[in-house]
Structures are given as structure tokens and as C-alpha cells.
Amino acid sequence: MSSGQNSGGLMSSAGLVRYFDAEDRNAIRIDPRTVVAFGLLFGIFVLILGFAF
């Protein structure tokens, strides 16, 4: 590969890294433990429905 060619790998992803690292003050913030707890409760709910019907 010659030094004049740009592969576009790291440079094209740099904007995405900046975008996802930026925090929006208006964004909804959910604690990760809340998401895990909701997933577990939903899974248990589905299992109960599976056994009931």
C-alpha cells in the first residue's frame, strides 16, 4: 500500500466515536441494574405464561 492512499478505516470511524461519547443533557438515563432487573422479571413472566398455558 502506498503512503498516498487512504484506507478510510480509522478516520471514518472517528466521528462515530465522538458521537457516541457525547452525552446529551436531554437524554433519558436508565441505570444498567434497572435494565437487568426488568429483563429478569420479563423472562420470569414469560416462563410463568409458558407453564400456565
Image (cartoon, rainbow, N blue to C red):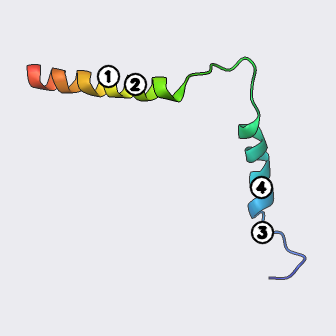
Please tell me whether mark 2 sits on a helix, a strand or a loop. helix
Whole-percent x, y for residue 26 in the image: 72, 17
Residue type marked 3? Ser
- Towards the viewer: 30 or 46: 30
Identify which residue is drawn at 85% across, 82% down. 2
Please tell me whether mark 4 sits on a helix, a strand or a loop. helix
Outermost front residue: 33
Earlier along the polypeptide chain: callout 1 or callout 4?
4
Disc 3 to disc 4, C-alpha distance = 9 Å
Q: Nearer the viewer, mark 1 or mark 3?
A: 1
Residue type marked 2? Ala
Give residue 49's mark: none
- Towards the viewer: 43 or 4: 43
Tell whether label 2 touches label 1 (CB within 8 Å). Answer: yes
Q: Image height check: is 13 above or below 35?
A: below
Earlier along the polypeptide chain: callout 4 or callout 2?
4
Please tell me whether mark 1 sits on a helix, a strand or a loop. helix
Say which residue label 1 marks. Answer: 41
Dot 2, crowdedness within 10 Å: few (<14), some or many (≥20)?
few
Disc 3 to disc 2, C-alpha distance = 43 Å
Disc 1 to disc 2, C-alpha distance = 6 Å
Residue 53 in view, yes or no: no
Say which residue label 4 marks. Answer: 12
Earlier along the polypeptide chain: callout 1 or callout 3?
3
Q: Image height check: is 32 above or below 7?
A: above
Residue type marked 1? Leu
Say which residue label 2 marks. Answer: 37
